[in-house]
Image (cartoon, grey):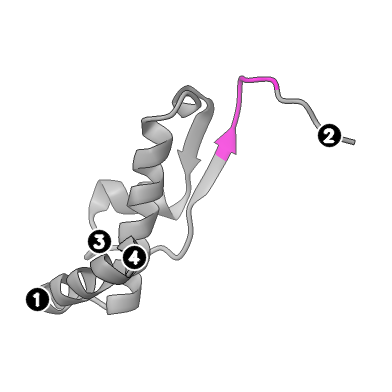
Amino acid sequence: MSEVDKVLPLISKRARELGYNIQHFQKLFFLEHFLKQISESNYRHYFVLKGGFEIQSLVGIENRMTQDLDAIYVGHPYNQIN
């Protein structure tokens, strides 16, 4: 059983307890997990969050349910493979 298979029932249970849409709550969980991974990486200083996800983090899940994560990667050169 994968880690995702283990955590999905727990996320769903918590969403029901709080009265949130289960799919939205799962998506929020995984977006936040992704952001945690970025924040712990060597690239953390090169991402700028913007849009609905950022607003949701400021005003709370009850007031805005975004469907995506907008980010810009800035300030670090990268090589394009031709």
Mark 3, Cα crowd under 10 Å, few <14 / some 14-19 / many 20+, is some
Determine which residue is flagged by label 2: 81
Indicate the quadrant where residue 31 lies: bottom left
Q: Secondary structure at mark 3?
A: loop
- Whether residue 23 sits left or right of residue 73 in the image: it is left
Q: Secondary structure at mark 4?
A: helix
N-terminal-most mark, 2 or 3 = 3
Q: Which mark's residue is nearer the viewer, 1 or 2?
A: 2
Indicate the quadrant where residue 79 lies: top right
Mark 2, Cα crowd under 10 Å, few <14 / some 14-19 / many 20+, is few
Amino acid type at image mark 4:
Val
What separation in Å lies between label 4 and label 3 (alpha carbons)? Answer: 22 Å
Residue 51 position within the rendered picture, expressed as x and y whole percent measured from the top left: 47, 49
Q: Which mark's residue is nearer the viewer, 2 or 4?
A: 4
Determine which residue is flagged by label 3: 61
Q: Nearer the viewer, residue 15 or 63?
A: 15
- Magenta region, residue range: 72-77
Q: Secondary structure at mark 2?
A: loop
In which quadrant of the rendered image does the N terminus lie? bottom left
Amino acid type at image mark 2:
Ile
Q: Which mark is residue 4?
A: 4
Mark 4, Cα crowd under 10 Å, few <14 / some 14-19 / many 20+, is few
Q: Nearer the viewer, residue 1 or 16?
A: 1
